[in-house]
Image: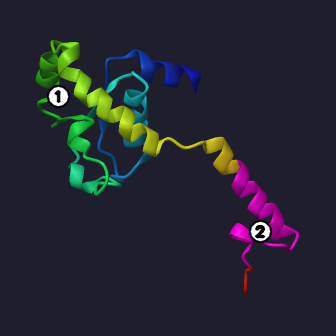
Amino acid sequence: RDAYLRAGLDHKFCIVAAGDYPNTGKYIEAIIFASRGGCVPVFIGVSPRSLAFGSVIDYRRVALWSGVSSLGSNLDLWRRWSAEQVRPMMEYARTVGKLLDYDAEGAEQALREVCRRVRIGRGPEPAMGGRVYG
């Protein structure tokens, strides 16, 4: 996992190919890498309209887009881009990354606690002191 994270931060591009399921986490991971100053996401064979959170995220501002057949020539072109040409995309990635990045360990810990309470018959604690009716 560490090598994967290092690669995402060290490479210039993160190639993300369309898969069987368009809303896989790999799109979000690539944006998180970009938000941390890592690779520029390159989405292949997918439409921005098909991705999750499309009403909130303008994916055209945070990633480069290519078809499979034009990927090689597009990468040749994009490699020659200056930092100034990439900067707006990376700045938008930082803004979006703050919305998408969550503490997976904290979320897992919260889920374990809810499961533990269900097993002992208490259920989750009510939010803000409210009462749970059931």
Between residues 22 and 132, which one lies in front from this camera angle? 132
- x and y, in percent, of residue 27 in the image: 37, 41
Which SS class for mark 2? loop
Residues packed near mark 2 inside 10 Å, few (<14), some (14 to 19) or many (20 plus): few
Q: Which residues are magenta?
A: 109-130
Residue drawn at the location 67% of the way across and 45% of the way down = 106
Q: CA distance from mark 1 to mark 2?
A: 51 Å
Q: Quadrant of residue 110?
A: bottom right
Residue occupying the point 61% across, 43% down = 104
Q: Where is the C terminus found, in terms of image quarters? A: bottom right
Q: Which residue is mark 2?
A: 125
Q: Secondary structure at mark 1?
A: helix
Q: Which residue is mark 1?
A: 71
37 with respect to 75 (left or right): right
Q: Is residue 7 left or right of residue 20?
A: right
Side of 25 where 62 appears, left or right: left
Q: Amino acid at mark 1?
A: Leu
Q: Is residue 6 above or below residue 119?
A: above
Nearest-to-viewer mark from 1 and 2: 2
- Pick whichever of labels 1 and 2 is earlier in the sequence: 1
Quarter of the image holding residue 86?
Answer: top left
Residue lying at 41% horizontally and 48% vertically, measured from the top left: 24
